[in-house]
Image (tube, rainbow, N blue to C red):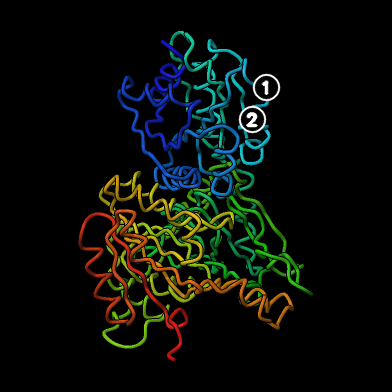
Amino acid sequence: MNGAECLLRTLVANGVDLCLANPGTSEMQFVSALDRVPGMRGVLCLYEGVCSGAADGYARMSNRAAATLLHLGPGLANGLSNFHNARKARSPIVSIIGEHATQHLRYDAPLSADTAAFARTISSAVQVLESAGQMGAAAAQVVRAAYGPPGQVSSLLIPADFSWSEAGSPGPVLARPTPPVPETARIEEARRLLAAGSRTAIFLSDRAMLEPGIAAAGRIASATGAKLFVNRFGARWSTGAGRFAACRIPYFPEMAEPMLRDCGHMILVEAEPPVSFFAYPNRSSLLAPESCHYFTLATIGEDGTAALEALADGLPPAPVLDFNPPAPPDRGELTPDSIGRAIAAYLPEGAIVSDEMVSASGDIVPHLIHSHPWEHLAVTGGAIGQGLPVALGAALSSPGRKVVALEADGSAMYSLQALWTMARESLDVVTVILANRRYQILDVEMKRTGAAVLGRQAESMIDISNPPLEWVPLARALGVPARQATTAEEFSRLFQRAVAEPGPCLIEALLPSGRPSPR
């Protein structure tokens, strides 16, 4: 069989059965081989950043790697920002990148680039295929490398002539590595710190933020009086009714620092010490006080949940959040607060929420805490344009579960092509666009960094209302049914209907700040 078919058969045998693709000429052999390899699902995305973001969302919800298929260096470059987010999420992804045929590389053709250098910026493992005969072994190895631990983007660069050349049999099925469990001595040291009562906090990130980790950490916190915090930028957080009320560290240091002020010891579980998103004048980058001592119960890449369960052994169950969402608004102005109350009231059990609201998140997410149990997917690496692709990938991984993308209008423009794939694949995603027609977070950050005066040119750099973004026709042009809400009552009614019906849809929530001033 040729190299392309060998690659696909090896991926499928190793459990990779989804390929998110934006291919070009050098990848046509792989596209053709999709019809000859049972078990591999190809999903077309109209932009490479949608491929990389969707692979991230798929991995977060399934803990399985998907493949991305991209075209040479420039195609990979288009996907780098969401690969960056995936790297911060520790998501296993198999990144397949086509390259010019070996005999063509010497001529520096227009699409020639140092593709391996691009890949190294976001990949923990990069392999350049050196012969068609290596295809099977290399494909198996790239899958194994993606699982780390921790999970990572693992890249394989394939010259076009190796895809059409004879490659022999598929590669072996390699065992998927599992995270090691921390040694008993660390668990006992954590137990000693908790017993000492020295203002101890527990800080969770990565897979320790999923339901089993939250449950075990909640038992520990409830029994010892320790405070339980989760990483605001963690890849996936299990929250909602029936789960322990862990505290999500706020974005701004003025809010986070008082919350951590009394912390004498911090037990880190698959986490590094919490830090501010940016540096600000006259502020420390670390959010906990300088006197805080850090103890690592489980490193990134270790099994923090197993360590927490060992630490919680014998402790009684912890109190959990009640199902007590706020009443949905039936009148009034459309604001982030009223949007949050409506979503909390109607969010289905087991919903998956992809959150890229940026400035509105702090007003909306707290309302959702007493909703039915749900999964929160945050922006892990800060690169804009993640929300819609991550929702797309989550929907591909979790048929039967409602996915809700809560998305700022400015951020959504980075990857609005994801809507087309949602429509093409008939995915069950409700997209809510919070339309203030402004880069609101930049308005806030400009003042916080000391640049308090907004002149005419500065104002124009954060205003996206001229011309206004019209999300209803944009979504419809991409195949997604869409409606606009301008009041709290309208939004509540549209969201209730959206979560009750299958398939993709979009609601543009036009906030007062995004509406033209009356003349």
First in sequence: mark 2 vs mark 1: 1
Q: Is residue 71 left or right of residue 448?
A: left
Which quadrant of the rendered structure holds the C terminus?
A: bottom left
Give the x, y percent position of residue 8: 41, 23
Residue nearest the observer in this picture, 394 or 324? 394
Which residue carries the number 1 mark? 107
Give the x, y percent position of residue 349: 28, 61
Say above or below: 244 vs 257: above
Say above or below: 199 vs 351: below
For the residues labelled 2 and 1, the Cα–Cα distance comes to 9 Å
The residue carrying pointer 2 sits among few (fewer than 14), some (14 to 19) or many (20 or more) residues within 10 Å by Cα, namely some
Question: Is any atom of residue 222 visible in this view?
Answer: no
Residue 416: image tag: none
Say above or below: 150 vs 408: above
Say above or below: 232 vs 176: below
Identify residue type, mark 1: Tyr
Which residue carries the number 2 mark? 112
Q: Residue at x 50, y 25 (%)?
A: 26
Give the x, y percent position of residue 220: 50, 60
Q: Name the outermost residue toward the bottom.
A: 519
Residue nearest the observer in this picture, 123 or 60? 123
User: Given contact means CB atoms under 8 Å apart, are the residues at marks 2 and 1 in contact?
Assistant: yes
Identify residue type, mark 2: Ser
Which of the two marks, 2 or 1, is nearer to us in this view? 1
Q: Quadrant of residue 457?
A: bottom right
Q: In which quarter of the image is residue 333?
A: bottom left
Q: What element carries label 1?
A: helix
Q: What element carries label 2?
A: loop
Q: Which residue is drawn at 46% across and 47% down?
A: 50
Q: Residue at x 22, y 56 (%)?
A: 502
